[in-house]
Amino acid sequence: MDYYSVRMRAAAGGAHEAGGQHISGGERLVGAEELEATVQKLLRRALTHELGQPDFVNLTVEKVASADVTQLPALPVTQREVQSVCEGHAAAVEELLQAGVALSAAQKAVALLVQGPAPHGGVMRGAIVMDADTGARLESDPARGVRVTQLDWEPRALAGWKQRMSRLGTAHERVAEALALATKVTAAADTVAELCWSDDPGYVGGYVAAKSIGYVRIPQLKEPGSPLGGRVFFVRGIRNVQEYEAALQAPVLIVEQTEQRGEQA
Ligand code: PML
């Protein structure tokens, strides 16, 4: 069976390429029977985002041969309890250190997401790529960053994950999407860890993820109403960002979620 990669990005004030402000995006990898519904769902997401009405929406559909799709088991999920944004940031730095990121790089990444990592202080369309040891930013275009494309859950695996997580109150689509992305990013050979928090003004949570620590949710990483957030991919030993980004764009399906010791949410 072939798959279809469906990508959406929406901006206000013109296309992203023309300096428009990024509003929302989405990535799916679905079978033919889900294609139309998926396009509709992503278009609806673009048109109903809390940041406002876009005047540019790019929707791309591409066929992907099933032989090209890699299957990956989702990272285990745990959660840190924090009482404030400040505690959330401290927890994020602690988890990043645990995953092997240098303290100065972890602190710099948190500060960048707080201030808005795009050149004029807004959100980026993609992620920052940061040297895990020096904290140097490596992405060639700091407004665009790098994008992760062609990923999704295998439908039965997602249903199983949701069922298991619903007992724990964490079966949300947003978490499932973020977990799929984090699983793909952290599986890439040169990724040390990922830090993310939402740029949605109505959602203040995020996570730190790495192969060694799994997906660690942190429920408070910014103040309600803030439109600032984003992703930082910490890397070690990449030859160039183009090759690294190419690895993040190879098709991946999340296929199994084995219950792991210590998983909780
Ligand atoms: C997003 O807004 O989609 C990015 C952040 C997702 C955090 C999901 C979680 O709470 O685990």
Image (cartoon, rainbow, N blue to C red):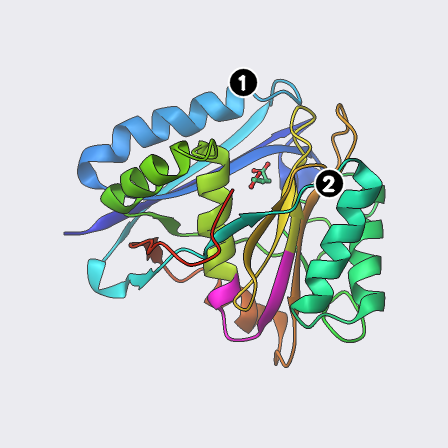
Residue 220 drawn above or below residue 128: above
Q: Which residues are magenta?
A: 186-194
- Above-or-below relation of 17 to 10: below
Relative image position of residue 77 (x, y in whole percent) = 49, 50
**Residue 125 pos. (x, y %):** 64, 44
Q: Residue at x 68, y 35 (%)?
A: 199
**Residue 213 shows in the view:** yes
SS type, badge 2: loop
Q: Tell me the residue at 46%/32% (across/down).
A: 172
**Which of 58/247 is in front?**
247
Q: Amino acid at mark 1?
A: Thr
Vertical placement of residue 112 versus 35, above or below? below
Disc 1, SS:
loop
N-terminal of the pair, mark 1 or mark 2, is: 1
Q: Which residue is mark 2?
A: 82
Q: Where, by quadrant of the figure, is residue 208 drawn?
A: bottom right
Which mark, by number, is residue 129?
A: none
Q: Position of residue 186 (x, y in %)?
A: 52, 64
Which residue is depicted at the point 48% across and 56% down?
A: 262
Judging by the rendered image, the residue that carries numbered circle 1 is 48
Q: Residue furthest front?
A: 261
Q: Is residue 222 left or right of residue 162?
A: right
Quadrant position of ligand 1: top right
